[in-house]
Image: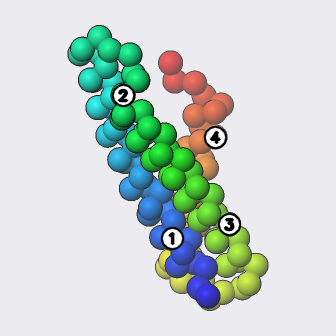
Amino acid sequence: MVFKNWSLRMLIYSLILSLILAYLMTRLVVVASSFGLKSETSLDINVLIFAFSSTIFYYLGIVFLIISFVKKELKDYKFYLAFFGYLLSFLVFLINYFYKFY
């Protein structure tokens, strides 16, 4: 089994779900603020599902990348793209954690 392919796919799925999640969050905030409603709509459960799925895909991709490295699979552009994608997302997390921009 080629784990680097699945690692890259999981990264792409996670990014797509994160974009959908960002769209749903902005829509939820606009709807709630324009009508003065509490955020207890059916959109809440969709946000929860997309956030959970995105997180699962993200961590599965990291696991597949580690398995690919341990099994010493041939490293091609898929491996390096997944590696640098996860590295970049980890660096963004560290920057947001240590430097609060507010």
Q: How is the image coloured?
A: rainbow
Task: In the rendered structure, find residue 94 and report the number of the disc placed on it.
Answer: 4
Badge 1 crowding class, 10 Å Cα cut-off, few under 14, some 14 to 19, many 20 or more, is many
Q: Secondary structure at mark 3?
A: helix
Question: Where is residue 45 shown, x and y percent of the image?
Answer: 44, 38
Identify which amino acid the numbered label 2 is placed on: Thr
Tell me the residue that label 1 is attached to. Answer: 8
Q: Which residue is mark 2?
A: 41
| Image quarter (top left, top right, bottom left or bottom right) of the N terminus | bottom right
Q: Which residue is mark 3?
A: 63
Kind of residue indicated by mark 4: Leu
For the point 41% across and 52% down, the residue is 17
Q: Position of residue 7 (x, y in %)?
A: 56, 71
At a point 29% along the width and 11% down the height, the residue shown is: 36
Q: Position of residue 83 (x, y in %)?
A: 58, 67
Quarter holding residue 73: bottom right
| Disc 3 crowd, CA 10 A, few/some/many (<14, 14-19, 20+) | some
Of pointers 3 and 2, the one earlier in the residue sequence: 2
**Which residue, as the protein is rendered here, is positioned at the far top?**
36
Q: Tell me which numbered mark, 1 or 4, is placed earlier along the sequence.
A: 1
